[in-house]
Structures are given as structure tokens and as C-alpha cells.
Image (cartoon, grey):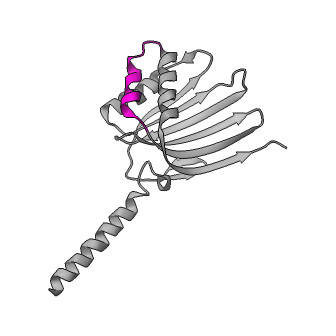
Amino acid sequence: MNRLVWLGLLLGVGAVLVGGCRDNQYPRCGAFEFDPLKLVDEDADPLDCGQQRIELELSGHEALDCALQALADGQALRVEIEREPRADAVEIRAELFADEDGLAMLWQDVNEDLNGFVEAKVVQLDVERAIGCRDVEDAGERYRCFDGALEAAELVDTCERRAWVSQ
């Protein structure tokens, strides 16, 4: 009887320890430092799709296509997208880290004139919707499709949010 009690206690403690660690694994908030953004989970090995700059016309769509392919393959990924300011004078730099199930950490740095905010949040992507963007022939439309999938993603957690106003 004593052995069964001890075994039950050990299994319970083991389950609590494993469950407690899960919250800090990639892409959860605890796997990142935010100033500057840095992935600190040594067990995470995302495919680095690189950086893509979006101007009036999409220039260089390799990073986006890499991210869409990684999602389709069930591969953890990292991609950075930077959008040039347009008439609305808003510039957005975003880094997306996603695991093989579409759980993603999205870091956005938004500048509007001299004001803006940074935000890091964990979202659950609709992977099928995002993967469907691969079928869009035009690269600019493919980006808009992917951007729509990011906007529609379900919020899981907000990791950090800071706003600033120019003096």
C-alpha cells in the first residue's frame, strides 16, 4: 500500500512539473524575451523563412512562400514581414513564430507618424485557411490572403503591449 501511495505521489508531482513547463515552451510567451525580441527556448528549432519587405508592390515573395509551405508541411517556422508606410503613414514590422499545429506568437511593432505600439500575442491560426493562400497566383494577393488569416486568428494570450506617444 505504501508503495502505491508513493508511486501515486511521484506520478502526480511529475505531471505537475511537465504541465508547468508546457506554458513556457515555444511559441508561448515564456519562450521569448521582448527587448529586443529573442527566442529563448533552446528546444525550439523553427525553420527561418527570413525577412520580407512589402512596398507598394510585393517585392520578393520567397519568405511568404516559405512560411506557407512550412505551415503546409507541419513545420515550426519563423518569418518577418515589414510593411512600408503608405498614405495612412503606418509602418508595421511583424515577426511570426508558429509551431507545427499553427499555434503562433506574433510580435508587431507599429509606427504611425511618431506614435505607435509594440505588441506580442499568442494566436491560434486557422492552418487550412492560411495554407489555402498558396493557391493564390498573384504574390500581392497571396500576402493579403495570409494577412487576413493572421487577422482572423483566435487570440490565446497577450504577452506584452507597450504604447508610446511622441512629445
The residue under the point 47% across, 37% down is: 153
- Horizontal and vertical percent for residue 132? 38, 23
Quadrant in which residue 78 is drawn: top left
Residue most extreme to the bottom: 2
Residue 158 position (above or below residue 70)? below
Residue most extreme to the left: 1
Q: Nearer the viewer, residue 84 or 121?
A: 121
- Horizontal and vertical percent for residue 62? 45, 22
Segment colored magenta: 125-138
Look at the image and say whether residue 132 sits in the magenta stretch: yes
The residue under the point 36% across, 30% down is: 128
Residue 35 visible in the snapshot: no
Q: Name the image quarter holding the C terminus.
A: top right
The residue under the point 35% across, 68% down is: 17
- Horizontal and vertical percent for residue 123? 47, 43
Quadrant in which residue 91 is drawn: top right
- Horizontal and vertical percent for residue 83? 61, 27
- Mark count: 0
Residue 85 position (above or below residue 103)? above
Residue most extreme to the top: 137
Look at the image and say whether residue 73 sits in the magenta stretch: no
The residue under the point 53% across, 46% down is: 121
